[in-house]
Amino acid sequence: MQSPSDTPSSTAAGKRARRKDARPSELLDAALELFVEKGFAATKVEAVAARAGVSKGTLFLYFPSKAELFRAVVQENLAARFADWNAEYEAMDGGSDSAADMLRHALQSWWTRVGATKLTGLTKLVISEAQNFPEVAACYHTEVVQPSQQLLRRVIQRGIERGEFRPLDAEYAVYSVTSAILYLVMHKHAIGLLAPASGELMPERYIASQLDIILHGLLGPAQAPPSRIPALS
Amino acid sequence: MQSPSDTPSSTAAGKRARRKDARPSELLDAALELFVEKGFAATKVEAVAARAGVSKGTLFLYFPSKAELFRAVVQENLAARFADWNAEYEAMDGGSDSAADMLRHALQSWWTRVGATKLTGLTKLVISEAQNFPEVAACYHTEVVQPSQQLLRRVIQRGIERGEFRPLDAEYAVYSVTSAILYLVMHKHAIGLLAPASGELMPERYIASQLDIILHGLLGPAQAPPSRIPALS
Amino acid sequence: MQSPSDTPSSTAAGKRARRKDARPSELLDAALELFVEKGFAATKVEAVAARAGVSKGTLFLYFPSKAELFRAVVQENLAARFADWNAEYEAMDGGSDSAADMLRHALQSWWTRVGATKLTGLTKLVISEAQNFPEVAACYHTEVVQPSQQLLRRVIQRGIERGEFRPLDAEYAVYSVTSAILYLVMHKHAIGLLAPASGELMPERYIASQLDIILHGLLGPAQAPPSRIPALS
Amino acid sequence: MQSPSDTPSSTAAGKRARRKDARPSELLDAALELFVEKGFAATKVEAVAARAGVSKGTLFLYFPSKAELFRAVVQENLAARFADWNAEYEAMDGGSDSAADMLRHALQSWWTRVGATKLTGLTKLVISEAQNFPEVAACYHTEVVQPSQQLLRRVIQRGIERGEFRPLDAEYAVYSVTSAILYLVMHKHAIGLLAPASGELMPERYIASQLDIILHGLLGPAQAPPSRIPALS
DNA sequence: GATGAATGAGGCTTCATTCAT
DNA sequence: CATGAATGAAGCCTCATTCAT
C-alpha cells in the first residue's frame, strides 16, 4: 500500500519525467521499424529521431552512436520476447498434453505473442544484418534461437519416445517448425512486398496448413488424426 | 587444314578483348558475393572492384552506377536460374512419376542446381533489399517465385486428384516446400553465421528430413511409404 | 518604457539565428565572385564554402546542389538589379528631358548602380555559362536584357520622332549603347586582366568618351552640341 | 616545274601522310568549337577526339595534355588571324584614303576575314578562360589586342590631325570600335543564344548601324556625310 | 535537457592520362 | 601510329556526430 505520491515531483514534473523516461523506448520503436524497413545502413538517424518525434541531437543523448542504437534495439526486444518464451516454456513443460498438442500450442502462441506483433521485425533485422553485427547476431542466437530449438527438440523427442511420433530424426525435424515460422516472418517483412498484387497470405490459414502437414508427417500411422481440412478463415 | 596462324593478332590482341568480355561477369560475381554478405548500402563499389581484381573506375566502364550494378546482378543470375527451372519444369511435367516422386525430385534437383551454388545468395539478396529496390523484387517475383510456386501447386494438386495425397489446402501446402527451401537459403547466408560454434547444418540430411515429414504429411494413410529414417549422410 | 532585458535569450540565442539568416547571402556572394572568376565548372564548392567562411557541408544545408547554387546566384542578383532598373525606368519615362539627356543619364546611372558594383559579374557569368544553363540564360534575357533594350529603344525612338536625333535605324542604334556597356563589363572581368601591365581603363573617362561619340553620332546636324572634350577625369 | 612524284611514297602512302599531318589541325578545330561552346573545364577530351574522328589516345599523341591543347588552339588561330591583320595593316597604312574610309574598311574587312568565320570563337574563348590561363590571355593581348588597338588609334589620331575628325579623346575613341566588334562576337557565341526566339541580329545591318553612328560621332560638323540610312540588308 | 546548425570523413562518380595490344 | 581498356586523383554530395545556444 504505497502512497500514490512518494516522489516529490509527482504531479507537475511527473508527466515530463514519464515522457522523458519514455524517450528511449519511443526511439527504439522507431528505430526497429526503420531498420526493418530499410536496413541498418540505409536508415538515417534523423529519420529515426523524426519518427520518434524528437530532434537528431536528442537521439545522441540516449545512444552514443548509430551502432549502439542498433544493439539496443535488439537487446530491448530480446528481453521482451525472451520473457514470454520463458513463460511459455515452463507452462508447456509442466503440463501433460500430448506432444502434438504441445507443438500446436507452441506455434499458435508464437503467432499471437510474436508473429502478429512488430517483434517479427527483429528476426528479419538480425538475419539481414548478421554479417555486419556478429556479436548482436550471436547474442540473438544464444538468447532466442537456441532456447526455442531446444524446447522444440525436447517436445519432439518426447513424442517419439512415447510412440506418439514416428521414429525420425528429431534434431532435424525441428527445422520443419522453425522454417514454417521463418517463412511467415520473411513473408511479412519482405516476400509479401515483392508483389503487392499477388494474393495475400492469410496467417491463420498458413499456420493451420503447416501444422496439419507437419503433424501428419510426424505422427505414426496409428495416431493419424481426422485429416482436418483447415477452414478457409 | 588449320593454318598455324590464321589471324595475325589472334594471340596478342585477343588477350585484351577476352579480358574485356570477362569483366562484366567477374564484376557481377564479386558484386553478388558482397551484396549478399554486407547488403547493398554497406558494400562499397571499391570493394566490388577490388574483389574482381580491377580498379574503382573500371567498374563504371561496365555499369553506369551502383544501383544499375545491383539490377544487373539480379537480372544476370535470374536468367541462369530461370533457364534451369524451365528445363526442370518440362522434364517433370512430361514424366509419369508419382506426385511424391516429383516433389522429391523437385527439392533434390533444386539443391544440386541452385541450393548448393552461390545462386542462393540471389534469394537472400532480393529479399534483403526488396524495400529499397521494389522493381527488382517485383521482377524476381514474376520470374522466379511465381513460376516455382505454380509448378509446385500443380504437382500437389495432381497428387490430390489422383488420391495420392490427402485432400488438403493445395494452395497453402505449397508453402511447406517453399519454406523448407527458404530456410536452407537463409541458413546458408545468415542463420548459420549467427553462431559459428553451433552445430553445422547438413543440407542433405536437412532435405531428407523435410521431405520425409512433408511427404508423410501429404500422403493419404494408405500410401504411407516405409518410414525411411534418413541416413546420417 | 524599455525594459532592459525584455526577452531572456535575446542576445544569446539570437546569434545563431542571425548567422543562419545571413548564411545564404554570404554563400551567394562568395559563389558569384568565384563563378565569375573561374567559371562554373572550375569552381569547387569547397572553395565557395571556404570563401564564405563555412565548411563544405554547410553549403548543402542551404542549396541542394552546385547547379542550384548557380541558379540561386543569378536569381538573387537578378531581383536586385531589376528593382533598380524599374525605378530608373519610371523616373526617366516621367521626366521631360531631352532624349540625349535621358541616354546620358541612363548610362551614368547604370554605372553608379550596376557598373561600379560586383553586379557586373552577373552579366559576365550568365554570358559565359549560357550554353550550360540555358534556362538561367533565358531568364536573364527576359528579366534584364529585353527590358533594358526596350527602354533604350523607346528613348531613341522618341529622339528621332522629336527631330532631336537623325532619322536612323532605331532598333540597331540601341546596340551602340549596349555594346558600350558590355565592353565595360567584360573589361572589368576579363579583358582588363589579360595584360595587367597595359594601361588601366578609367571607367568615367570611358563612359564620357562613348557618350560623346554616340550622342554626336545620333544627333542631327542642327543640334550638334558644343563638342566637349571630356575632362581627363 | 617540280615533278609530281618527287617523294618515294607519294601515291599510296601520301594520302595517309596527308591525313596524318591534318590530324593536329582537325583536333584543333574540334577543340576550338567545343571549348567555345562549353568552356574549357566542361569540355571532355574524349568529345574533342570524337568530333575530330579519332580516339582519345590519339589526341595525346599530338598534345601532351588538355591544357596544352588549349594553348595550341589559341596559338594556332592567333597565327592565322595575325597574318591577316598584318596584311590589312600595311594595306591601310600605305593608302591615302580618308580616316573615315579606313575605319569603314577596317570594320568591314574584319567582318569578312574574322567576324563571319569561326575565328570569333577564339575571342570568346580567351575572354572566358582568361583567369584560368593568364599566359595565354597575355599572349593574345600582345599579339592581337594591342596591335589592333594601336592601328585603330593611329587612324583616329590621323583623322583628328587632319581635321577630318573632331578633336576628341583619341585613346578612348578606339573603344567605340572595339566595343562594337566585341558585342558582335559575344552575340554570336552567347547573347544570341540566350533567347533563340528573340529576333535575329543581322550582322551587316549591325555593322552599318555602328559605323554610321561612330563615324557621325567622330566627324567634325563640316564633314558630316549624307546621313545614309543603312539599307535593311 | 533539447535543439538544429555546423562539421568533415567517406562514398559514388567523372575524366584526364597511361599503356598494352 | 592508333586504339580503347584501365587507372586513380579529385570533385560532388551525404550523413553520423558534435556543440553552442
Image (cartoon, coloured by chain):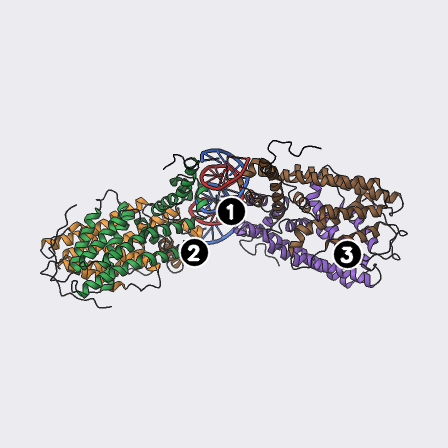
Chain colours: A brown, B purple, C green, D orange, E red, F blue
SS at mark 3? helix
**Which chain does the residue under circle 1 lie in?**
B
Tell me the distance, in whole angstroms, between the alpha carbons under discs 2 and 3.
Answer: 61 Å
Distance from label 3 to label 1 (Cα)?
49 Å
Residue B160 disc label: none
Mark 2 nearby-residue class (10 Å; few <14, some 14–19, many ≥20):
some
Left or right: residue C228 versus residue C188 is left
Question: Residue under circle 1?
Answer: B57
Q: Quadrant of residue A154?
A: top right
Q: Quadrant of residue C30?
A: top left
Mark 2 falls on what kind of element?
helix
Does residue A25 appear left or right of residue C52 in this picture?
right
**Residue A62 seen anywhere in this rendered image of the structure:** no
Instruction: Quote the CA–CA distance across marks 1 and 2.
Output: 21 Å
Which label was assigned to residue B173? 3
Say yes or no: labels 3 and 1 on the same chain.
yes
Q: As shown in the figure, which amino acid type bears the numbered disc 1?
A: Gly
The residue drawn where x is 84% and y is 39% is A94
Q: What residue type is labelled 3?
A: Ala
Query: Considering the image in quadrants, where does the N terminus of chain B appear?
Result: bottom right
Please state the horizontal and vertical placement of residue C164, each as a whole percent of the image.
16, 62
Q: Residue B62: where, in percent of width, then height? A: 54, 52
Q: Which of marks 2 and 3 is in front?
A: 3
Callout 2: chain: D
Q: Mark 2 points at which residue?
A: D50
Element type at mark 1: helix
Q: Do labels 1 and 2 share a chain?
A: no
